Image (cartoon, rainbow, N blue to C red):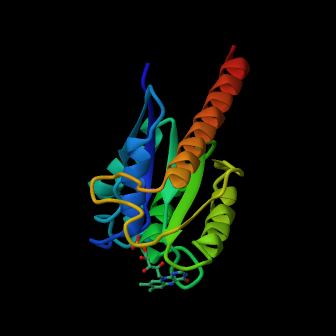
Amino acid sequence: MTRTIGYIVGSISSTSINRRLARVLANLAPQGTELVEIPIKDLPFYSPDFDGEFPQVAVDFKKAIGDVDGVIIVTPEYSRSIPGVLKNALDWSTRPYGEMSFFGKPVAVIGASGSGVATAAAQQHLRAILGHFNAITMGQPEGFIQDRPGLFTEDGQVTDESTAGFLSGYLQAFDGLISRVQHSAELVNA
Ligand SMILES: Cc1cc2nc3c(=O)[nH]c(=O)nc-3n(C[C@H](O)[C@H](O)[C@H](O)COP(=O)(O)O)c2cc1C
């Protein structure tokens, strides 16, 4: 059986280094696990005015989260927090009221930045938001990737062995968390 992990890229930049990182993760996925993108760029700005009738793109977004075994959020840091496009997507995920898409969902966070802080501040904010959603967020390993020219190629390869090893271990750890969550659910439902 194939396990499916969704990934959300918190950047809509056409030259996003975080999208490159996501491609690398997709290429390093453990055997039997497939990574698929959950796109956010076409979501309109959320407003309660939509609560009566969700646009199809938001229905699809919530369904995509529901359909996968876990979600990796790959995000840049903007102004020491997460980009607005990602926050907008997360807001959509919480509505309609009482239908939080991330409730009980295994989630891992990771990000790349050229700066030394390597998205640490953004990830702390993101973890606080995910805690409110009651998502099951992977604590370790933390994914603070300091980008440098040539680290990630356009076709989703990583040129540095130690980074490749770290990212493979990161994916295996998340796969393990998903297995434990699914096993616990089976025991509860037995
Ligand atoms: C509006 C804006 C705010 C930014 N704020 C931060 C920041 O707080 N910390 C940081 O490390 N980099 C910051 N950066 C630099 C980003 O890390 C860098 O642009 C990175 O390439 C963005 O990720 P992306 O290429 O995946 O879009 C900021 C960039 C922009 C455009």
Looking at the figure, which quarter contains the C terminus? top right
Seen from the viewer's position, the closer of residues 118 and 177 is 118
Q: Which image quarter: residue 115? A: bottom right
* Image point (41%, 72%), residue name: 85
Instruction: Give the x, y percent position of residue 40.
Output: 36, 61
Question: Can residue 98 be seen at all in this image of the molecule?
Answer: no
Instruction: Give the x, y percent position of residue 104.
Output: 63, 42
Question: Can residue 108 be seen at all in this image of the molecule?
Answer: yes
Instruction: Give the x, y percent position of residue 22.
Output: 41, 54
Left or right, residue 131 beside residue 83 = right
Left or right, residue 14 beside residue 123 = left
Looking at the figure, which quarter contains the N terminus? top left
Seen from the viewer's position, the closer of residues 90 and 159 is 159
Q: Is residue 122 above or below residue 178?
A: below
Residue farthest bottom in this picture: 79
Instruction: Give the x, y percent position of residue 27.
Output: 38, 43
* Image point (39%, 44%), residue name: 26
Q: Which image quarter: residue 129? A: bottom right
* Image point (41%, 70%), residue name: 46
Seen from the viewer's position, the closer of residues 27 and 148 is 148
